Amino acid sequence: MKKVAVQGSLEEIRQQLSMKGYEVVDFEDRGIVDAIVYIDDYTGIRNMNNEGDVESHGAVLINASKKSIDQIIYIIEARRYEGLFT
């Protein structure tokens, strides 16, 4: 099961990921995560930069702006954005 940190204001995404079987945690939680989902600004992510576990593990950052839950799940699983340069 993948562990995903989700920004507090993204309650719908948090619920949908949880229903799909992901372990969802808050930005403030410590430890290793597979992905970080945020919206537009970097509130909370700056504080995570100081957490050594995140950097050493290589969590993928996902800006949820204008993305469906299916797109977010694809990014979590593939660890990349589809068609980044196309």
Image: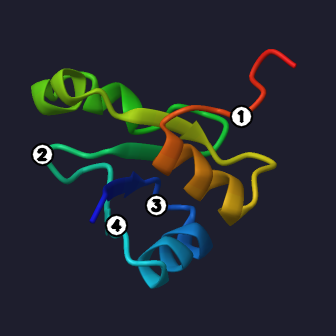
Mark 3 secondary-structure assignment: loop
- The answer to whether residue 13 is above or below residue 6 is below
- Going by the numbered disc 4, the residue's amino acid type is Val
Sequence-earlier tag: 2 or 4: 4
| Residue in the picture at 60% in, 33% down | 41
Q: Quadrant of residue 10?
A: bottom right
Residue farthest bottom in this picture: 19
Element at badge 1? loop
Is residue 20 shown above or below 82? below
What SS does tag 4 mark? strand
Residue 40: image quadrant is top right
Q: Nearer the viewer, mark 4 or mark 3?
A: 4
Counting labels gives 4
Amino acid at the residue labelled 2: Gly
Question: What label does residue 8 carry, if any?
Answer: 3
* Residue at the spot of label 4: 24
Q: Secondary structure at mark 2?
A: loop
Residue at 75% in and 51% down:
67
The span from disc 2 to disc 1 (Cα, nearest Å) is 27 Å
Q: Which residue carries the number 1 mark?
A: 82
Q: Are marks 1 and 3 in contact (CB under 8 Å)?
A: no
Whichever of labels 4 and 3 marks the residue nearer the N terminus, that label is 3
- Residue at 32% x, 45% y: name it: 34
Q: Nearer the viewer, residue 15 or 76?
A: 76
Residue 39 x, y percent position in the rendering: 63, 45
Q: Residue furthest right?
A: 86
The label shown at residue 31 is 2
Left or right placement of residue 17 versus residue 31 in this view:
right
